[in-house]
Amino acid sequence: MAAGVSIIPLGGVEEIGMNMTVLETDDSLIVIDSGLMFPEEGMPGVDFVIPDYSYILDNRDKLKGIIITHGHEDHTGALPFLLRDLDPDVPVYGTLLTIGLIKDKLKEYNVKNLLFIIIKPRDRITLGDFTIEFIRVAHSIADGVGLAIETPYGTIVHTGDFKFDSSPVDGEFLDISRFAQYGERGVLLLMSDSTNAERGGFTPSEKVVRAAFEDVFAKAAGRIIIATFASNIHRIQQVVDVAVEFGKKVVLCGRSIESNVRIAMDLGYLKIPAETCLKVEDIKNLKPEETVIVTTGSQGEPMSVLTRIARNEHKQIKIKIGDTVIISAKAIPGNGRAVGKIINQLFKIGADVIYEKVADVHVSGHASVEELKLMINITKPKYFVPIHGEYRHLHRHAYIAGTLGIAVENIFMLSNGNVLEINQEAGFLADGVTAGRVYIEGKNLCDIGDMVLKERRRLSQDGVVIVLISIAKEDGTIVSGPDIITRGFVFESSSKEIMDEARSLIIETFAALDDSFEKNVINISAKVKSKLRKFIRNKTEKRPIIMPVVVEV
């Protein structure tokens, strides 16, 4: 095959979140988005997950810039880590709101002296072999863009997250004419958002939510508490507009939502009358029927405001009979159980809870099937790559593309780390690159590693057994113990017989050691661990973590 352009997803395919894609030629490399993913079940102690971006670091000499399509954390959350590891003069491109949100986030990580370049829709930039035009799209956050990327081998269109909203809250429509113009010129490859590829028809407009809010506000007798994504500026604007309509006051509660609202107001993306927006401390002075609280926690996050309210642990906000809680978001895959638990708890303590399954209090920001078809039809790509979705979403989107006449051999379903090389003549999968997940705990910029995660899972499933033994320094005989302590495994009161057998086994193990065995702390610990592991597995079919603590006296 002749030379071509390489498309390399490092995150964001076969999963929701962690979006990061590399485009590369012989001389140039650009990165599109740098996102995180929130932890799934089986990731105890993990705060979030980011892509393994070692391939970018290995090729930093070719890196011309990082382009961010919009301000959601699944597209921006890995930036503090990536930028820490790159030269400070690598430019980051994004719209005004996107860059504003990124800069605020980077303050938390003390990442400084970076080069940010603010762009507007229809701006064009050149980065090495790539000339990029930014095209406005409609999404659940303001200021989102898709990309038309001209390469020496043809034009690549990357939709970003999008939908065709005919009545967007901010009046900024998806620039359908610009996408169509590129389609008329000829598009080599379309990379398109697959999140709603299983949902037929068209995604409703964001303004549908306003009607649902108006209905709830008209009927609610007490306070109204609304949980939504902190980045959903359009949704917050609609809450404010309806609150003003009904003569209510709005209280923002939660660090991320307060920060994002401040940034959006400073940049002109959100308008809240000064007399409407109050602080949490003012709640006590408001009548219930005039109070609207906007907060975080729509995904059941353990430390979020809504979760603390549901557990009756929030200092200023306690649920009262007559309160209405609106969860204005859809559970991200993996968060359904946590959200369901919060809903149950809120009902139990007396709130009336309204959520997506019972009212139109949320609409998606992603295109449904007919919109996905429209994007394919107006761009007329030769090659097609579905992105931004789990495998089933990608598979369905690939099927849709096939029904619209794209040749089966020109449709590529990629996995993270795959390398797709294309030019006008052909496309094929080349040797892959390093890709994977990096598990992050706290803000210490440190991957906790697969081994630590595996041990945490074992602790949560089978517990831990600690054996305390004191041995004589002279001959290695037992001076005291063995004492056995268990946590999360079996209780000594209910398994005295097993514990007695375990102690006897350890004593017998010591007695059986011959003179050739060097009786030091390390060797004895290993021997006890091995014997006890087999014993417990045979007796209980459990595999707790065994921790011998051997001390010489």
Image (tube, rainbow, N blue to C red):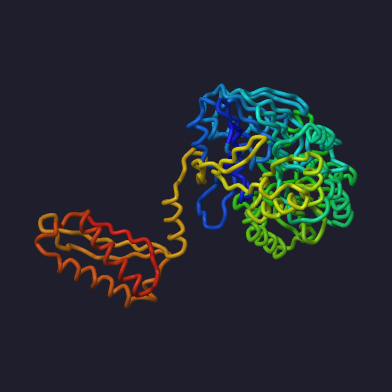
Please tell me which residue lies in front, 417 or 488.
Answer: 417
> Where does the C terminus fall, quadrant-wise?
bottom left
Where residue 123 appears, as percent x and y from the top left, is 75, 24
Q: Residue at x 60, y 53 (%)?
A: 302
Quarter occupied by residue 529: bottom left
Q: Could one spot residue 275 in this view of the protein?
A: no
Return the residue found at the far bottom: 497
Where residue 122 appears, as percent x and y from the top left, is 78, 27
> Where does the N terminus fall, quadrant-wise?
top right
Q: Residue at x 61, y 33 (%)?
A: 5
Relative to 105, 551 lies left or right:
left
Please tell me which residue lies in front, 246 or 222.
Answer: 246
Where residue 309 appears, as percent x and y from the top left, is 67, 54
Q: Is residue 423 above or below residue 466?
A: above
Q: Is residue 196 above or below residue 422?
A: below
Number of numbered tags placed on the structure image: 0
Please tell me which residue lies in front, 140 or 379.
Answer: 379
Q: Could one spot residue 31 in this view of the protein?
A: yes
Q: Residue at x 79, y 36 (%)?
A: 183
Where residue 3 appears, as percent x and y from the top left, is 58, 31
Relative to 19, 365 lies left or right:
right
